Amino acid sequence: MTLTLAVSCFHPGQEESGAGEPCDNFTDLTLSHCFMGTSLYVRLLLYTLSNLNCGHELNHHHLSTQPLFNVSRPTTFVIHGYRPTGAPPIWINHIVHLLAEQEDMNIIVVDWNKGAANLNYFTAVAYTREAAHNLTEFIMNMEEEGASLSSVHLIGVSLGAHLAGFVGANLKGKIGRITGLDPAGPMFTSATPEERLDPSDAMFVDVLHTDINSFGLRGAHGHIDFYANGGADQPGCPKTIFAGKSYFVCDHQRSVFLFLCALNRTCSLTGYPCSSYSDFLDGRCLQCEAFEPAPCPVLGYDVSRWRETLLRLGQTQVFFSTTATLPYRKLSYRVDMVTWNQYLRWCVIYIRLHSGRTFTEARIDHKLFRFEQYTSTLLLAQFDEDVQHIQKISVRINTGNVIGPRYKIRLLQIRFTPLEHPDRPLMCRFDIIMEENVEVVFRPLPCDSHI
């Protein structure tokens, strides 16, 4: 009896596909590679609905011989950024699967880890131009095979956002879309539009900012720029260097996690057009007349539905706030208060929404608000939890007064307008006396109940 032993040899980190073919996985390097430095080598890993869990490395030149790649489908390229440790990005598999849920497409992970993995950041920056030429040639080959440039979408993270911009510029801005997730700031803060991502690089460019005061890039660089929590200092991220690596990367990486959450449609993160985050927090930018009849733009894959309006408006900056953890979404209310008090008061406001034993609180304390006689004051109240079927509301004021009598404010009316849920009713209450640091609890009424 003869025993035959079949041996399959895979590269390190490879797995088998369902058909028994080896999978091509993202290049996994070590810190020693980064110390020695890596030379640029670009790999293109294809994922489709038929091979979502098993990457297939594409030949850059012979597309017609690669049956998994269909040029008639839209194609999305995912481009990572600087990799100082050489490890694969932890989010690659997540973004591949979530993109596949949007529509039937070719998803190509641009693996330039050999090049991006260098302790010398300046070397990685220099490689972005070369990697962009490599990717440009591939897309030109796609076009020769019948692909439409307008159906190409580049998603670039950090340094990868500028790499995507260089590809777009090489192709004269004819590709359909570029999404920049917190474009890298170091080495690009003084760059001209030709030297970084800018709106002319594609037919539509959307950008998300989360770390503009460190590793991200300040300024507006797309047709629409989303600023999460003002674009800096994300909630839940460490505030001191004693947290180690997380202190340096948390804010910057949040752009990826917010985008993943938006792709998953578990976070509906609405951006409000405004000149600054402080104006947004002051409640000065809660209208979206420029986008009517559509609502305000929402972060994510479908933001291109606002493309025509944004091209008409020119570069638009939009702001939103998030929580520290999934699903990141805050519940926002516009709060209108009409005061009757005789004397001028400066206060911060705390508002709680109650449903049974559950409640959520908004602390509107980023500055003192002015309340004076017969004056309407507009506030933005943002809650971490989405409490529905609100049974009661409590309000508390604080003037910072530590001596003397407690100040009082009389409200002729307070009105709560849900911003992201127009299907929910407006809530009002009339003629309330509030004493400093004393919580006033009331049951909300329909706003048309007061004659």
Image: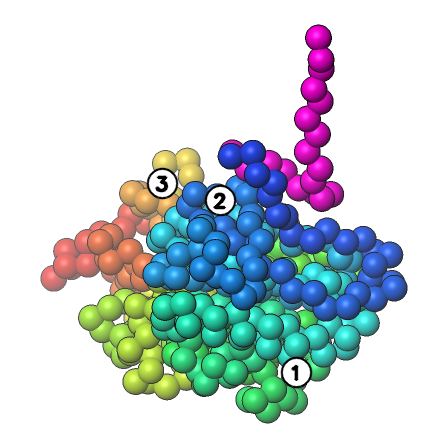
Residue 155, horizontal then vertical, whole percent: 51, 65
Residue 292, horizontal then vertical, whole percent: 22, 73
Residue 172, horizontal then vertical, whole percent: 45, 85
Which residue is found at the position 69% from the left and 40% from the top? 10
Q: Secondary structure at mark 3?
A: strand
What kind of residue is marked 1? Answer: Phe
Q: CA distance from mark 1 to mark 2?
A: 35 Å
For label 3, the residue is 355
In terms of sequence position, does the residue under pointer 3 or pointer 2 come before the other? Answer: 2
Most prominent secondary structure in the magenta stretch?
A: loop
For label 2, the residue is 52
Q: CA distance from mark 3 to mark 2?
A: 42 Å
Which residue is found at the position 42% from the left and 39% from the top? 358
Q: Is residue 243 visible?
A: no
Q: Nearer the viewer, residue 440 or 300?
A: 300
In terms of sequence position, does the residue under pointer 1 or pointer 2 come before the other? Answer: 2
In terms of sequence position, does the residue under pointer 1 or pointer 3 come before the other? Answer: 1
Q: Are marks 1 and 3 in contact (CB under 8 Å)?
A: no
Would residue 313 appear left or right of 232 to someone viewing this image? left
What kind of residue is marked 2? Answer: Leu
Q: Nearer the viewer, residue 241 or 439?
A: 241
What is the residue that sits farthest to the top in this orientation? 1
Q: Label for residue 188?
A: 1
Q: Which residues are magenta?
A: 1-18
Q: Nearer the viewer, mark 1 or mark 2?
A: 2
What is the residue that sits farthest to the left in this orientation? 451
Asked whether 4 falls inside the magenta stretch, the response is yes
